[in-house]
Image: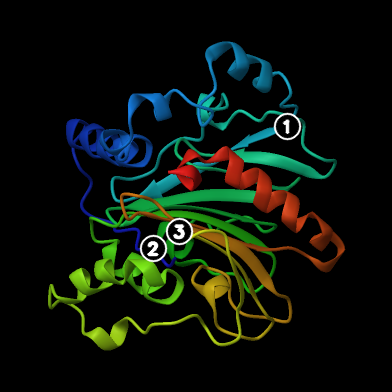
Amino acid sequence: MRLAAEKQAEPSGQEKSTIMTLVHNLLRHRSALLLPCAVLAGTTFLSPRHAQAAHSLITQFQGCTADGQTGPVAAPTVLPTPFALAAPLPAGLTLYASQDLAAVGPVGWHCLQLYGSSGTFLMLRPEAFPQSDRAALEAQTNGPGIQLSSTFGTTSGRFDVARTVARAFPNYQAYVQSVIQEGIEPASHFPSGPYPDDQITREGDRDVAFTTPPHTTGFGTESRLIANNSPIQGLLHLTTAHDLMALQVRLPPSQSHLTQTIIEQTRKLNADFGR
């Protein structure tokens, strides 16, 4: 999703702490009230003993800085516990993690998390991100890249979520209509049905795997990735709280064989793909 990373006047330290706490809680606990304790204690989460064992398998880890509505956030220096891997990654791949999201990508890439009231996303690409705040926030790429996003369906992100739901999740059109009925955006902004050129595979009524072919518009270009002569592959998942998880992956031709591994491992890393 093309999430807006709103910049406002620099808040006080207390305000910044309060807003960041809210963002983290939305990301990590927003569905807690909807799930029974038995599910929360299930296989989605690792016990401390298993988490420690999984951490021991991580030989490479790159922390990602974040920027957005309340200003910059330092990259983690220790892998956040929710992002433990159960097995080593194949050669040539490593783990990239911010405080809120994690993705697998080629070794040597650069990463940046952007966040705002609409949600948050993690961007990976071979080139370094610009130093200028505004340039970094608006950065797009017509080359290789990976974007993982979490868009909130009950905040300002609901418009982007509804647009994707209209195209990808036919059993949840009531949610789309509820957003349209607010009268803020016209119904014409929410076209229904998949993109005509996309190849999609449904994995239940809340999961879609897709491929956006070269030089076309589709779920793959609902991101910072600009259409070029390579396909974009990825996943969409609508949570029970109507938040949207989206992953778009475009690798160099020499590394395209790693695409499915990246998709599968990134899906496992982020618990919201299972909520």
Q: Is residue 266 left or right of residue 117?
A: right
Tell me the residue that label 1 is attached to.
60
Where's the C terminus, which quadrant?
Answer: top left
Pinpoint residue 154: horizontal percent, then vertical percent: 23, 55
Query: Which residue is at a point 61% across and 62% down the rendered structure image?
Result: 234
Disc 3 marks a residue whose amino acid type is Arg
Q: Nearer the viewer, mark 3 or mark 2?
A: 3
Tell me the residue that label 3 is attached to.
206
Label 1 to label 2, Cα distance in Å? 29 Å
Viewer-proximal residue, 191 or 68?
191
Pinpoint residue 102: horizontal percent, then vertical percent: 56, 41
Q: Is residue 234 visible?
A: yes
Pinpoint residue 222: horizontal percent, then vertical percent: 49, 72
Where's the N terminus, which quadrant?
Answer: bottom left
Q: Secondary structure at mark 3?
A: loop
Q: Secondary structure at mark 2?
A: loop
Label 1 to label 3, Cα distance in Å? 32 Å
Please say if 156 is above or below 70.
Answer: below
Query: Which residue is at a point 31% across and 34% down the rendered structure image?
Result: 32
Q: Which residue is outermost to the top?
A: 49
Q: Residues within 10 Å of mark 2 (few under 14, many from 20)?
A: many
Q: Residues within 10 Å of mark 3 (few under 14, many from 20)?
A: many
Disc 1 marks a residue whose amino acid type is Gln
Q: Is residue 187 left or right of residue 131?
A: left
Q: Nearer the viewer, mark 1 or mark 3?
A: 3
Instruction: State which tag comes first along the sequence, 3 or 2.
Output: 2
Query: Which residue is at a point 60% across and 86% down the rendered structure image?
Result: 197
Tell me the residue that label 2 is attached to.
3
Instruction: State which tag comes first along the sequence, 1 or 3.
Output: 1
For the residues bearing labels 1 and 2, Cβ distance under 8 angstroms: no
Q: Is residue 86 left or right of residue 173?
A: right
Q: Is residue 264 left or right of residue 195?
A: right
